[in-house]
Image (spheres, rainbow, N blue to C red):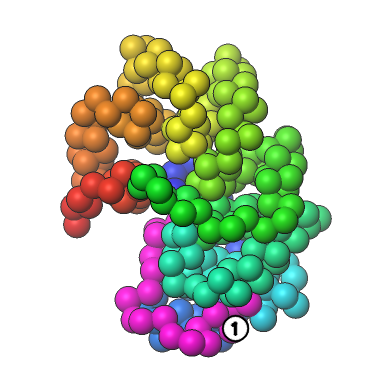
Amino acid sequence: MRMLSVWSLCVLVGTAADAQPILIDVLARHGVELPGKNFEAAFDAGLGPTVAVGAGAFATPLARLSVATGSDRVAAAYAFGILAGRSAREALPGELAAAGQALVQMMGSGDRRSRIAGARVAGRVLAASFEPGGVRPPLPAGLTEGLFSLLNQPNEYEQLAAMDALGLVRETNAVAALTERYAFYRADGKRARAGGALEALARIGDVSTVELVKTVAAERWAEGRDATALAVAFARERLLKDGSIVIIQQAVGSQSHRVQARGYLQELGATVPW
């Protein structure tokens, strides 16, 4: 989500006018047309290759991740994320390792856009499966530390990016911090950030979160038609299996929450309506 677009992330990244025609061409050759020629928008929409990803497909984004800066590097990160897909199913181990190192470096950048993009892409390509015995791709050195650093930044979008990635990689060491953040955000009236923390906790699936979700399920706070209410439904289905998947399935028909709902269904291994 996953994606921070459901939390109204608005980070300016490169478009064809000022950036990467070669990256756009690489994506187009793999069946990915960028909406508005915007890399982040394609990443947000969950677009992926419809043409087989062959040898050498990642050469250009990896090269730009290594040498580019600013918007060029951000675009390369999103391009890699789009091609690699969730849990980097399209990338070779060596390619993923090289990208992981570059994404960790981005999270330590002085540029906020780069920090956010690094965290978001790392979360997706290193995401762990919910399936029993599912294997998580190896995490690069410094990733967890980089995500905790972002979590402690004052900027809302950096916090959301960090929570999203910590949940996707199922970082169990983040449970205490995320639980505290959830309580703090709720008390402070920061509904979107509280929803992001709860979503991350649901993905990690620690036993301590089960009682928390049971409590949330009985509260009016869980009601509504926004992204946070849908995140609560995801948490309930993930940890309680109480039939809340129906809420998620219905949300697929919502223009504003379609991508979020489809992402949840894919994670839960459910049929995704078109």
Q: From this view, report whether residue 147 is shown above or below residue 137.
A: above
Q: Does the stretch in magenta take in 192?
A: no
* Residue 23 x %, y %: 55, 81
Give the amino acid at mark 1.
Answer: Thr
Q: Is residue 264 above or below residue 55?
A: above
The one of 252 and 59 positioned closer to us in this rendering: 59
Question: Residue, x 36% and y 45% (percent of image)?
Answer: 132
Residue plotted at (50% across, 53% down):
136
Residue 103, given in percent of the width and then of the height, sits at: 67, 62
The reply to whether residue 48 is visible in this rendering is yes
**Left or right: 24 as drawn, with respect to 249:** right
Q: Quadrant of the C terminus?
A: bottom left
Position of 217 with respect to 202 (left or right) is: left
Residue 124 in the image: above or below residue 187:
below
Looking at the image, which residue is at 56% across and 71% down?
93
- How many numbered marks have been drawn onto this rendered protein structure? 1
User: Where, by quadrant of the figure, is residue 31 drawn?
Assistant: bottom left
Tell me where residue 51 appears, x and y as whole percent: 34, 81
Q: Nearer the viewer, residue 173 or 35?
A: 173
The residues colored magenta run: 41-62
- Asked whether, in this view, residue 72 is left or right of residue 195, the answer is right
